[in-house]
Image (cartoon, grey):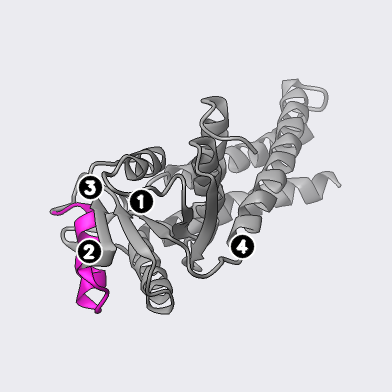
């Protein structure tokens, strides 16, 4: 058992570093929260070294550190399984047709071009708008670092360029967080997404939290619309989302 745990720590530590290299090579060194994989690699390789030390120094301090670490890892796995099940439930949501509004949540824009994550949201928004001709799309996202235009403007250009009528595309270009996306859309003049049947569209890993935030803000009939995730980045995004959910729970911004 001891040898299995020791070997497991070594393998997991190496895999964390390999995945970090893959994520940064694919999405860039600036990828949000990518450091967590380096931290994980250091943590598990440190445990591996502690197993080696404890083997040659029985009943030393290393044994106590390993026991405490084991308890923390077990608790972490339990929490991740619980939160992961909630995130997966959002991924599998079926969206009703003919919604009054769909809030398309913004994501990073590279200059004036949509990032991979935003492009997947836009493809899902286009598909829904084509099938539901009376639905109004609220395009929500401000201008952040490295962006030459707002996320809302980028989405507007993409969707109008593909033939979605401009009268159906409403821009909200001040928000910088998911909470602000929802709050600022609810405050748009002449629009009533909070009191209407409203879809919340984002990548699949994000829709559970987005929908929970919407309900906390008083959206009376909100529905999740999950856009496709990215196979390589999915593990990273899901892990990041777990930490984001914990933060929102601690600040009272959402409920499970």
Q: Position of residue 43 (x, y in %)?
A: 58, 38
Q: Position of residue 99 (x, y in %)?
A: 47, 63
Do the residues under discs 1 and 2 have CB atoms within 8 angstroms? no
Report whether 76 appears left or right of 222.
right
Question: Residue drawn at (23%, 65%), measured in percent from left and top?
Answer: 167
Q: Position of residue 147 (x, y in %)?
A: 18, 52
Distance from disc 3 to disc 4, alpha carbons, whole Å, reads: 27 Å
What segment is highlighted magenta in the picture? Answer: 149-166
Distance from disc 3 to disc 2, alpha carbons, whole Å, reads: 11 Å
Question: Residue drawn at (38%, 78%), measured in percent from left and top?
Answer: 130
Task: Judge the density around disc 1: few (<14), some (14-19), many (≥20) Cα neighbours within 10 Å.
Answer: some
Which residue occupies the foreground of this view, 188 or 26?
188
- In the figure, residue 154 lies in which quadrant? bottom left
- In the figure, residue 41 lies in which quadrant? top right
Q: Which mark is residue 156?
A: 2
Which residue occupies the foreground of this view, 17 or 220?
220
Tell me which label, 4 or 2, sits earlier in the chain: 4
Q: Is residue 205 visible?
A: no
Label 1 sits on residue = 31
Task: Judge the density around disc 4: few (<14), some (14-19), many (≥20) Cα neighbours within 10 Å.
Answer: some
Distance from disc 1 to disc 2, alpha carbons, whole Å, reads: 25 Å
């Amino acid at each position: 058992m001891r040898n299995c745990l020791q070997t497991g720590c070594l393998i997991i530590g190496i895999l964390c570093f390999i995945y970090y290299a893959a994520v940064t090579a694919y999405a860039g060194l600036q990828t949000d929260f990518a450091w967590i994989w380096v931290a994980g690699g250091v943590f598990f390789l440190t445990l591996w070294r502690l197993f080696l030390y404890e083997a040659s120094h029985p009943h030393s301090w290393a044994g106590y550190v390993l026991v405490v670490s084991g308890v923390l890892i077990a608790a972490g796995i339990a929490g991740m399984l619980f939160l992961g099940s909630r995130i997966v439930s959002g991924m599998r949501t079926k969206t009703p047709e003919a919604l009054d509004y769909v809030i398309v949540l913004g994501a990073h824009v590279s200059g004036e071009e949509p990032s991979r994550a935003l492009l997947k949201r836009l493809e899902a928004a286009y598909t829904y708008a084509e099938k539901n001709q009376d639905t109004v799309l609220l395009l929500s996202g401000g201008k952040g670092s490295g962006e030459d235009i707002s996320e809302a403007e980028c989405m507007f250009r993409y969707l109008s360029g593909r033939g979605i009528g401009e009268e159906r595309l409403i821009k909200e270009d001040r928000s910088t967080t998911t909470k602000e996306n929802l709050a600022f859309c609810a405050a748009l003049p002449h629009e009533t997404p909070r009191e209407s049947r409203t879809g919340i569209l984002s990548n699949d890993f994000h829709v559970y939290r987005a929908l929970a935030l919407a309900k906390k803000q008083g959206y009376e009939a909100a529905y999740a619309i999950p856009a496709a995730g990215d196979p390589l980045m999915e593990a990273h995004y899901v892990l990041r989302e777990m930490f984001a959910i914990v933060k929102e729970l601690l600040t009272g911004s959402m409920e499970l």
